[in-house]
Image (cartoon, helix red, strand yellow):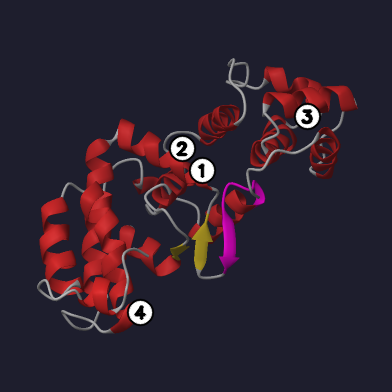
Amino acid sequence: MDVESLNPKDGVKLLTSLGVTGPDEEMCRALEDMAGHAFGLVLLGHYLVDVVGDPDITKRDHVKLLKAHVKGAEKAKATLRAYADWFGAESAETAMLHLLGLFDRPVPMATLWALVAEPLIAGPTEPSYVADAPPLAMVLRRLEELKLITRPDAETVDGHLLVREYFGAALEKSSPDVWKQAHSRLFDYFCTIPDKDQPDGEAGLLPLYQSLHHGVAAGRAQEALFDIYYQRINRNGRGYGTHQLSLFST
């Protein structure tokens, strides 16, 4: 779901398709509150139907945190805060959303498993894989039903940019050490994917380019710049990645 503004007719149609009920006038007011933000309406609709258990659009002002005097994307983020409160800070769902917030692109399941491997990173990311947590497939299915994540295929997890931004920022603010540890693990993970120190071609370099973002976020910028970008991607300054392959980012 993109973020382009919806007109009133389409906004009412979207809310109705989600099972929301009530006067069209109130639905239009909800649309105005969201500044026509389509994904924000999806979040609100599912929150009323699945969390509040009352699809009446007039009940939206009773939803915690939605009374804030903000509009558009900020109103959508307020809805995400309501979801986080509903799940609980130590829930498997919130933990998975924090993990998703570490990435700026769709995430292969293999990468998620690398994040949750031993030794465990204690903190807000932990509940999604501790022994008494619900099965990962169940957590992902629940989040997908609520439109908080998408599954492009069985081996990939993705989410709307707002979801990744919100839960990533929440993790960084509340647990900066966990944020750095998680990015550090991802940096090491992507650096070890290539089967040679200086891999060939775009496919070979892709994991190294992906590692750079995580290295910087982990506080390992110097290592990312020299060991990975200069030595491995550009082959000790010979410009393999940038000049020969014309790759500047991925």
Which residues fall within the magenta stretch?
145-153
Q: Residue at x 63, y 43 (%)?
A: 3
Task: Determine whether the residue tagged by mark 3 lies in a helix, strand or loop.
Answer: loop
Q: Position of residue 30 (x, y in %)?
A: 74, 26
- Seen in the image, is 147 located left or right of residue 227? right
**Residue topped by disc 4:** 203
Q: Measure the alpha-carbon separation of dots 3 and 4.
A: 49 Å
Q: Residue at x 34, y 78 (%)?
A: 202
Q: Position of residue 115 (x, y in %)?
A: 32, 58
Near mark 4 (Cα within 10 A), the count class, few <14, some 14-19 or many ≥20, is few
Task: Determine whether the residue tagged by mark 4 lies in a helix, strand or loop.
Answer: helix
Mark 1 vs mark 4: in front: 4
Instruction: Report the disc number at residue 54.
Output: 3
Q: Residue at x 28, y 59 (%)?
A: 186
For the residues bearing labels 4 and 2, Cβ distance under 8 angstroms:
no
Near mark 1 (Cα within 10 A), the count class, few <14, some 14-19 or many ≥20, is many
Looking at the rendered structure, the kind of residue marked 4 is Ala
For the residues bearing labels 1 and 4, Cβ distance under 8 angstroms:
no
- When the figure is inspected, residue 61 is found, relative to residue 249, above or below; the finding is above
Mark 4 vs mark 2: in front: 4
Looking at the rendered structure, the kind of residue marked 1 is Val
Sequence-wise first label, 1 or 4: 1
Residue that lies at the very extreme toward the right in this rendered image: 23
Q: Measure the alpha-carbon separation of dots 3 and 1.
A: 24 Å
- When the figure is inspected, residue 43 is found, relative to residue 34, above or below; the finding is below
Looking at the rendered structure, the kind of residue marked 2 is Tyr
**Residue topped by disc 1:** 163
Looking at the rendered structure, the kind of residue marked 3 is Asp
Q: Position of residue 136 (x, y in %)?
A: 49, 58
Residue 83 shows up from this direction: yes
